[in-house]
Amino acid sequence: MGYAEDWGELMFDLRCLNKGSAKRQFKQSIRYAFGGLCAYCRCKRATTIDHLKPKSRGGEDLRSNLVPACRECNHSKASELWLPWYQRQEFYSDVAQELIEEWIANKRLDIEDYDERTINNRTTVCFTASTIRSNTNEPTCSRKDSRSIATSTNGTKERCSADADDERNLVQSR
Protein backbone atom coordinates (compact mmCIF):
# COMPACT_ATOMS: atom_id res chain seq x y z
CA MET A 1 0.00 0.00 0.00
CA GLY A 2 1.47 3.32 -1.04
CA TYR A 3 0.67 6.97 -0.73
CA ALA A 4 -1.17 9.01 -3.32
CA GLU A 5 1.35 10.92 -5.40
CA ASP A 6 -1.23 13.12 -7.10
CA TRP A 7 -4.61 14.35 -5.84
CA GLY A 8 -6.28 12.59 -8.77
CA GLU A 9 -5.26 9.21 -7.33
CA LEU A 10 -7.52 9.83 -4.35
CA MET A 11 -10.50 9.90 -6.68
CA PHE A 12 -9.98 6.30 -7.81
CA ASP A 13 -12.94 4.18 -6.73
CA LEU A 14 -14.26 6.92 -4.44
CA ARG A 15 -17.61 7.87 -5.85
CA CYS A 16 -18.58 10.11 -2.95
CA LEU A 17 -15.68 12.58 -3.36
CA ASN A 18 -15.85 15.35 -5.88
CA LYS A 19 -12.72 17.01 -7.27
CA GLY A 20 -12.65 19.73 -4.59
CA SER A 21 -13.04 17.24 -1.74
CA ALA A 22 -10.27 15.05 -3.12
CA LYS A 23 -7.92 18.05 -3.33
CA ARG A 24 -8.72 19.10 0.24
CA GLN A 25 -8.13 15.56 1.48
CA PHE A 26 -4.84 15.37 -0.46
CA LYS A 27 -3.59 18.66 1.02
CA GLN A 28 -4.72 17.66 4.49
CA SER A 29 -2.72 14.43 4.25
CA ILE A 30 0.40 16.47 3.40
CA ARG A 31 -0.14 18.78 6.39
CA TYR A 32 -0.80 15.79 8.62
CA ALA A 33 2.47 14.12 7.57
CA PHE A 34 4.39 17.06 9.06
CA GLY A 35 2.24 17.28 12.17
CA GLY A 36 0.43 20.39 10.95
CA LEU A 37 3.60 22.48 11.28
CA CYS A 38 5.58 24.32 8.65
CA ALA A 39 8.16 21.98 7.10
CA TYR A 40 10.74 24.79 7.09
CA CYS A 41 10.57 26.75 10.36
CA ARG A 42 8.83 23.95 12.33
CA CYS A 43 7.33 26.48 14.75
CA LYS A 44 4.27 27.92 12.99
CA ARG A 45 1.08 26.28 11.85
CA ALA A 46 1.12 25.28 8.19
CA THR A 47 -1.65 27.18 6.44
CA THR A 48 -0.39 26.77 2.87
CA ILE A 49 1.16 24.11 0.67
CA ASP A 50 4.50 25.02 -0.94
CA HIS A 51 6.12 23.60 -4.07
CA LEU A 52 9.70 22.55 -3.32
CA LYS A 53 10.51 23.00 -7.00
CA PRO A 54 8.30 25.94 -8.00
CA LYS A 55 5.81 25.53 -10.81
CA SER A 56 7.52 28.45 -12.59
CA ARG A 57 10.65 26.28 -12.80
CA GLY A 58 8.86 23.15 -13.98
CA GLY A 59 7.71 21.75 -10.64
CA GLU A 60 4.60 19.58 -10.56
CA ASP A 61 1.69 19.12 -8.17
CA LEU A 62 3.05 15.78 -6.97
CA ARG A 63 3.03 14.77 -3.32
CA SER A 64 6.83 14.52 -3.28
CA ASN A 65 7.09 18.14 -4.50
CA LEU A 66 4.64 19.59 -1.97
CA VAL A 67 5.26 20.40 1.70
CA PRO A 68 3.19 22.26 4.26
CA ALA A 69 4.39 25.79 4.96
CA CYS A 70 3.36 28.78 7.00
CA ARG A 71 2.39 31.85 5.02
CA GLU A 72 5.61 33.72 5.94
CA CYS A 73 7.96 30.95 4.75
CA ASN A 74 5.93 30.37 1.59
CA HIS A 75 6.01 34.07 0.63
CA SER A 76 9.67 34.46 1.59
CA LYS A 77 10.70 31.50 -0.56
CA ALA A 78 8.61 32.72 -3.50
CA SER A 79 9.86 30.99 -6.67
CA GLU A 80 13.29 29.96 -5.42
CA LEU A 81 14.46 26.37 -5.13
CA TRP A 82 13.91 25.19 -1.59
CA LEU A 83 17.40 24.09 -0.50
CA PRO A 84 19.44 27.25 -1.27
CA TRP A 85 16.67 29.39 0.21
CA TYR A 86 16.32 27.17 3.30
CA GLN A 87 20.06 27.09 4.03
CA ARG A 88 20.12 30.91 4.20
CA GLN A 89 17.38 31.07 6.83
CA GLU A 90 18.14 31.67 10.52
CA PHE A 91 15.87 28.74 11.47
CA TYR A 92 17.78 26.30 9.25
CA SER A 93 18.02 22.80 10.73
CA ASP A 94 19.90 19.75 9.46
CA VAL A 95 17.15 17.51 10.86
CA ALA A 96 14.38 19.40 9.05
CA GLN A 97 16.41 19.32 5.83
CA GLU A 98 16.79 15.57 6.20
CA LEU A 99 13.05 15.15 6.77
CA ILE A 100 12.24 17.15 3.65
CA GLU A 101 14.78 15.16 1.59
CA GLU A 102 13.19 11.92 2.81
CA TRP A 103 9.80 13.35 1.82
CA ILE A 104 11.13 14.16 -1.67
CA ALA A 105 12.54 10.64 -2.03
CA ASN A 106 9.12 9.34 -0.91
CA LYS A 107 10.72 7.26 1.82
CA ARG A 108 8.30 6.09 4.45
CA LEU A 109 8.04 3.47 7.12
CA ASP A 110 6.00 0.63 5.69
CA ILE A 111 5.52 -2.49 7.74
CA GLU A 112 5.52 -4.41 4.44
CA ASP A 113 9.16 -3.42 3.89
CA TYR A 114 10.33 -5.40 6.90
CA ASP A 115 11.00 -9.09 7.01
CA GLU A 116 7.95 -10.82 8.47
CA ARG A 117 10.21 -13.16 10.43
CA THR A 118 11.44 -10.26 12.58
CA ILE A 119 8.07 -8.62 13.21
CA ASN A 120 4.99 -10.61 14.14
CA ASN A 121 2.09 -8.17 14.23
CA ARG A 122 -0.60 -10.61 13.14
CA THR A 123 -3.38 -11.84 15.37
CA THR A 124 -3.43 -15.54 16.07
CA VAL A 125 -6.64 -17.52 16.24
CA CYS A 126 -7.21 -19.35 19.51
CA PHE A 127 -9.37 -22.49 19.33
CA THR A 128 -9.63 -23.11 23.06
CA ALA A 129 -12.82 -22.27 24.94
CA SER A 130 -12.81 -19.03 26.89
CA THR A 131 -14.29 -18.61 30.34
CA ILE A 132 -14.44 -14.82 30.04
CA ARG A 133 -17.55 -14.75 27.85
CA SER A 134 -19.93 -17.52 27.06
CA ASN A 135 -23.52 -17.71 25.89
CA THR A 136 -24.70 -19.19 29.21
CA ASN A 137 -24.98 -15.71 30.75
CA GLU A 138 -26.80 -14.16 27.80
CA PRO A 139 -30.43 -13.08 28.36
CA THR A 140 -32.98 -14.80 26.17
CA CYS A 141 -35.19 -12.77 23.93
CA SER A 142 -38.88 -12.99 24.69
CA ARG A 143 -40.20 -11.47 21.43
CA LYS A 144 -39.47 -11.86 17.73
CA ASP A 145 -39.00 -8.10 17.25
CA SER A 146 -35.32 -7.18 17.02
CA ARG A 147 -35.97 -4.15 19.22
CA SER A 148 -37.59 -6.11 22.02
CA ILE A 149 -36.64 -5.82 25.66
CA ALA A 150 -35.90 -8.89 27.76
CA THR A 151 -35.76 -9.18 31.51
CA SER A 152 -32.63 -10.90 32.76
CA THR A 153 -32.36 -13.16 35.80
CA ASN A 154 -31.33 -10.31 38.09
CA GLY A 155 -34.43 -8.26 37.14
CA THR A 156 -32.82 -5.68 34.85
CA LYS A 157 -34.29 -4.97 31.44
CA GLU A 158 -32.02 -5.14 28.40
CA ARG A 159 -32.44 -4.83 24.66
CA CYS A 160 -31.78 -7.98 22.68
CA SER A 161 -32.09 -9.19 19.13
CA ALA A 162 -34.13 -12.07 17.81
CA ASP A 163 -32.40 -15.40 17.60
CA ALA A 164 -31.15 -16.77 14.28
CA ASP A 165 -34.20 -19.00 13.63
CA ASP A 166 -36.61 -16.07 14.04
CA GLU A 167 -34.50 -13.94 11.68
CA ARG A 168 -34.47 -16.69 9.04
CA ASN A 169 -38.26 -17.08 9.29
CA LEU A 170 -38.68 -13.31 8.99
CA VAL A 171 -36.52 -13.18 5.84
CA GLN A 172 -38.34 -16.15 4.27
CA SER A 173 -41.77 -14.59 4.94
CA ARG A 174 -40.84 -11.46 2.96
Image (cartoon, rainbow, N blue to C red):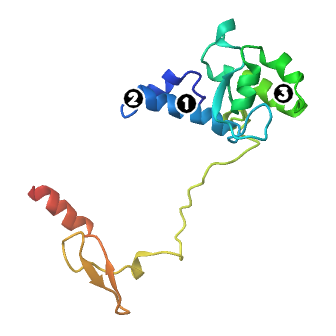
Residue drawn at 63 percent across, 23 percent down: 63
Q: CA distance from mark 2 to mark 3?
A: 35 Å
Quarter containing the N terminus: top right
Give left or right: position of 23 versus 63: left
Q: Mark number for residue 18? A: 2
User: What secondary structure is marked by label 2?
Assistant: loop
**Who is closer to the viewer here, 152 or 19?**
19
The residue under the point 9% across, 58% down is: 173
Residue picked out by circle 3 = 97
Furthest-left residue in view? Answer: 173
Image quadrant in which you'd find residue 65: top right
Report the front residue among 40 and 105. 40
Whether pointer 1 and pointer 3 mark residues with C-beta atoms closer than 8 Å, the reply is no
Snapshot quadrant of residue 99: top right
Which is nearer the eye, 148 or 120?
A: 148
Element assignment for label 1: helix
Query: Which residue is nearer to you in this view: 90 or 132?
Result: 90
| Position of residue 170 in the picture relative to residue 20 (left or right) | left
- Give how far across and how far down residue 39 sits, in percent: 75, 32
Q: Amino acid at mark 2?
A: Asn
Quickly name the residue at label 1: 26
Label 1 and label 2: CA atoms lie apart by: 12 Å
| Coordinates of residue 66 in the picture (x, y in percent) | 66, 23
Of the numbered discs 1 and 2, the one sitting upstream in the chain is 2
Relative side of 83 to 44, left or right: right
Q: Give whichever of discs 1 and 3 has the lower sequence position.
A: 1
